[in-house]
Image (tube, helix red, strand yellow):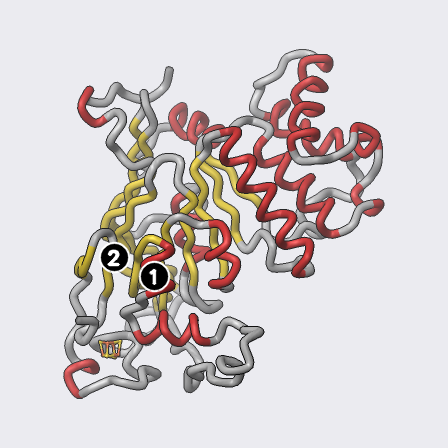
Amino acid sequence: MVGHQLKENSVTDSPHISVRNLSVHFVLGRQLFGKPPVVRAVDEVSLEIPKGSFFGLVGESGSGKTTLGRAILKAAPITSGQIVYRDNEVEYDLGSIGKEQLKDYRLRAQLIFQDPYAALSPRMTVRDIIAEPLEVMGITHTRAETDDRVREMASKCRLNLEHLRRFPHAFSGGQRQRISIARALVCNPRFVVADESVAALDVSIQADILNLLESLRGELMNTFLFISHDLSVVAHICDTVAVMYLGALVESAPTRSLFSNPRHPYTKALLSAIPSLDPDVRGKAQKLEGEIPSPITPPSGCKFHTRCPIAEERCSSEIPLWRELSDGHSVACHFAE
Ligand code: SF4
């Protein structure tokens, strides 16, 4: 087995993924004078994703959640900080992971794509699409072995065996997403990143896919990082939710605690924007003024101060401390108490 042995007392208690002060910055081109502009996509983020959890990561578009997910998959460069993956018998520091370990990590960590229309090759049958990772990774060695694995995963994802002979254009959005999920899970990964995996689907189909992911998590015992801009979707499925704004975490808590007692003004605004059928609640959404600022020139102090309805003078100069207020509920706001 690739990877080094963990200390005995850390085997069961360790989180699956541990992110420490992670920054992912992208330098934009060159400049004749001065330094080139830098996009601070992820800035000093720390979080723990426990083994077997369904961990939600939410925020507006441009908040850095997809870049964070990609960095955890070792698909975006780490500028500084640390990402450690731990499972029973292995521990990988993704910043210094070797070639053989990376190959093993690619088997353990997979991505479910956002767009089920763009993610599937129109020239391949469903059987070949699901089989491809098994063959590329060298997990199966004969066609019969591959077919067995493909059929097993297709049936877990509620696809009929006759579907395997067809091409993607013959399927609806929900069926295509089930094919994408079967492909992502066919190698039995331990950790799965689902990036806006239901965003392109109708609401009724979203529920079907969320229920499927939940039942697969129970059956396959994987850990999920579920990235979404939609808090109502995250509430349906996640155990813990972290909220990102402009590359930084602003709040993180067990789902029930975050929804019943949000502490950060940004989380409150996102929650109040969830559509409600209750006529007393409808139309009372707390609107966020303006656009999310540029990650090239983020505001000083609290990055949210340019849009925060309760900002005070110190907010523009003093970065709020990230601190735990109650069991597992952490926040970065001067006035969270
Ligand atoms: Fe608003 Fe200030 Fe809290 Fe930032 S620190 S969220 S600006 S009140």
Residue 75 rendering spot, x and y as whole percentages: 45, 45
Indicate the quadrant of ligand 1 in the picture: bottom left
Give the quadrant of the C terminus.
Answer: bottom left
155 is higher (above) or lower (below) than 245: above
Residue closer to the observer: 157 or 261? 261
Q: Say which element carries label 2.
A: strand
Q: Is any atom of residue 267 visible in this view?
A: yes
Residue closer to the observer: 15 or 78? 15
Tag on residue 135?
none
Q: Which residue is mark 2?
A: 329
Residue depicted at 57% across the width and 44% down the height: 112
310 is higher (above) or lower (below) than 124: below
Residue 223 rendering spot, x and y as whole percentages: 43, 37
Residue 251, quarter of picture = bottom left
Residue 221 rendering spot, x and y as whole percentages: 46, 30
Dot 2 crowding, Cα within 10 Å, few <14, some 14–19, many 20+: many
Q: Is mark 1 within 8 Å of ligand 1?
A: no
Residue depicted at 48% across the width and 39% down the height: 192
Residue depicted at 24% across the width and 52% down the height: 328
103 is higher (above) or lower (below) than 174: above
Residue 96 rendering spot, x and y as whole percentages: 29, 35
Residue depicted at 59% across the width and 45% down the height: 211
Q: Are marks 1 and 2 in contact (CB under 8 Å)?
A: yes
Dot 1 crowding, Cα within 10 Å, few <14, some 14–19, many 20+: many
Work out whether mark 1 precedes mark 2 in sequence or the reverse, and give the earlier one. 1
91 is higher (above) or lower (below) than 200: above
Q: Which residue is mark 1?
A: 258
Give the quadrant of the N terminus.
Answer: top left
Q: Say which element carries label 1.
A: helix
